[in-house]
Structure formats: C-alpha cells, structure tokens
Image (spheres, helix red, strand yellow):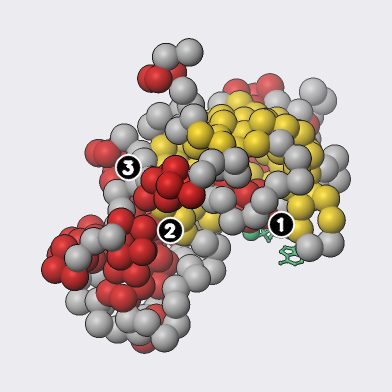
C-alpha cells in the first residue's frame, strides 16, 4: 500500500465500551483524506463513546484505531505525541477549562503538544479566534461567553494546531438553526482550505445530507454499526431504520 492510499482514520473490529459494559462491537469504517464522515445514531447509541476511542482517550477492549497508518493504542509515546499534534477534538459540551481564559484554553495544548513558545502561542490563539469570529473574547472566561461563543471557542481550541484530522461531537447542538448552519459552513470552509478530514457526530440530518461523504449509523439495539455509506445512497437504499432516521417525517415504506 502506498503512503497516499493510507486512510487518515481506519477503525477495525472495534468494541466500544462505557463504564457499564459493551455498547457496540465489530465497528469498521474509515475516513480518507479530506472526507467528512458523519457519525449518526439515536441518543445513547454510543456516538460520544466511540469518539473517545477515536481520540485515543479510551483503550478499546477489542479492535484497533489507526490514525495516519499508526495504531493509536499500540504506538510508542513519541509517535503518540506526533499523532496528537495532528488531531483536533471538540467535545460535546465544549469541555473548556472553566478557570482558564479562552486564550489560555487555546494555548495550553499548543504548549503541551507542540512545545510552542509564548509569543507564537499568543499569535496563534489570536489568529484562530479571528477565524471563528471571536476576536475580542480571548481574555474572557468560558462562563462569560454565550453558549454559541463557547462552541466557537471550543472549535478554536480544536483548530489551533491546524489538525489534519478533526473530531467533532455535535458542534451545532444547542445553537439556533442559523448559527448552527453558520458554524457548520465555517468548519467545512476551514477544512476544505486545509484538506482536513472531519469525523463529526451530529443529529443534524440536513447537514449530513449536505456535507458528509460517508455516514456511519450506530444502532444501540443491535449493538453494532447498522450501515456505512454515502448519506444519499443510504437515504434511498439503506436499511429501513436508517432511512427513517435520515427522513423522520416520511411515512415508512417497505425496503
Ligand atoms: N462516563 C460514563 N459512565 C457511565 N455510563 C456512560 C458514560 N458515558 C456514557 N455512558 C452511557 O453510555 C451510553 C452511550 O452514551 P454516549 O454518550 O456515548 O451516547 P451518545 O450516542 O453520544 O448520546 P447523545 O446523542 O445523547 O449524546 C449511554 O447509555 C450513557 O448513559
Ligand atoms: Mg453524545
């Protein structure tokens, strides 16, 4: 296999657990360079738990997660550090450090993961905040921001290292539809410019149909991935449960 054909993310036979036990098993999918992959499924189906496994934060009981051709859970510390520098993560609730200013939130990973000096960190934080339209918020604490601003600050933190792989957990949830669509467009525009690969957990089916190249549908009842494919393809020809999820107002029709 040539280097260029290596998927950015390759998930093979992955089991996803939470504290209580097994949620999903046999999860297989990949994300190629520059693709937008949507992870979709009912609330509680294990989307955020899956994302934690993809982010290197939860050791899987079974299977593997390869990022840029390296196994996330079987690499040495040096390789892992390099992989983390190339990944950006935005958690479902934002997960900003509440006692740190927005600037400090953005600068901490720059120092810890990339070893950047103070002037470079400050310049990068300023530039990234400008990208997400938060030019004047750098000195504020997260509690001083609106929900939408907190989302954008969390996005800025995820983007600050100019990641090649961006993992996003419901970036638009809790925002009004216009702000959510704007944030969606912003993420897509930024990533198209840099060829970033995106894996995005979302409940926003319009967004999935609009931007995703691939959709991974988690089924909690089955305890596995029920379908992987292009969203339009799945909307037309996918399993009934997947079609119903993509188009909930449509009366169900036989498969
Ligand atoms: N830290 C935890 N400890 C115990 N159980 C957890 C933990 N995190 C999640 N769970 C449970 O694991 C299951 C999957 O949760 P998860 O957050 O992955 O679902 P989700 O698909 O992201 O849901 P949502 O769409 O509501 O965000 C749920 O039943 C949830 O209650
Ligand atoms: Mg979740």
Which of discs 3 and 2 lies nearer the camera? The answer is 3
Q: In screen coordinates, is 135 left or right of 149? A: left
* Residue 241 coordinates in the image, percent (x, y): 77, 37
Disc number placed over residue 243 in the picture, else none: none
Element under disc 3:
helix
Q: Where, by quadrant of the figure, is residue 242 drawn?
A: top right
- Distance from disc 3 to disc 2, alpha carbons, whole Å, reads 17 Å
Q: Is residue 67 above or below residue 137?
A: above
Disc number placed over residue 43 in the picture, else none: 1
Q: Is residue 167 above or below residue 92?
A: above
Q: Where, by quadrant of the figure, is residue 40 drawn?
A: top right
Element under disc 1:
loop
Q: Residue at x 43, y 47 (%)?
A: 78
Element under disc 2:
helix
Q: Is residue 26 above or below residue 49?
A: above
Whether disc 1's CB lies below 8 Å from ligand 1 is answered yes
Can you see residue 89? yes
The residue carrying pointer 1 sits among few (fewer than 14), some (14 to 19) or many (20 or more) residues within 10 Å by Cα, namely few
Tell me, yes or no, whether the two marked residues, 3 and 1, touch with CB atoms within 8 Å.
Answer: no
Q: In screen coordinates, is 144 left or right of 80? A: left
The C terminus: image quadrant: top right
- Distance from disc 3 to disc 1, alpha carbons, whole Å, reads 27 Å
Residue situated in front as seen by the camera: 88 or 36: 88
Label whose residue precedes the other's in the sequence (3 or 1): 1
Disc number placed over residue 191 in the picture, else none: 3
Q: Determine which residue is flagged by label 2.
A: 180
């Amino acid at each position: 296999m040539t280097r260029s054909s290596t998927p950015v993310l390759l998930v093979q036979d992955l089991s996803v657990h939470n504290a209580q036990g097994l949620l999903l098993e046999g999860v297989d999918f990949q994300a190629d360079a520059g693709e937008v992959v949507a992870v979709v499924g009912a609330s509680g189906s294990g989307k955020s738990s899956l994302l934690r496994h993809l982010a290197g934060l939860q050791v899987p009981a079974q299977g593997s997660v390869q990022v840029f051709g390296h196994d996330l859970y079987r690499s040495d510390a040096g390789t892992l550090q390099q992989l983390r520098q190339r990944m950006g993560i935005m958690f479902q609730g934002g997960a900003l450090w509440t006692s740190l200013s927005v600037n400090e939130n953005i600068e901490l990973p720059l120092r810890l993961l990339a070893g950047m000096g103070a002037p470079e960190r400050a310049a990068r934080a300023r530039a990234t905040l400008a990208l997400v339209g938060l030019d004047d918020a750098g000195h504020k604490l997260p509690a001083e921001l609106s929900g939408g601003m907190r989302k954008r600050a969390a996005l800025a933190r995820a983007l600050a290292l100019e990641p090649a792989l961006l993992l996003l957990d419901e970036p638009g949830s809790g925002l009004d539809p216009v702000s959510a669509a704007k944030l969606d467009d912003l993420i897509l525009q930024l990533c198209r410019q840099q060829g970033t690969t995106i894996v995005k957990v979302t409940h926003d089916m319009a967004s999935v149909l609009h931007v995703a190249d691939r959709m991974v549908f988690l089924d909690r009842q089955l305890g596995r991935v029920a379908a992987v494919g292009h969203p339009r393809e799945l909307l037309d020809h996918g399993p009934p449960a997947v079609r119903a999820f993509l188009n909930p107002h449509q009366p169900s029709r036989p498969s």
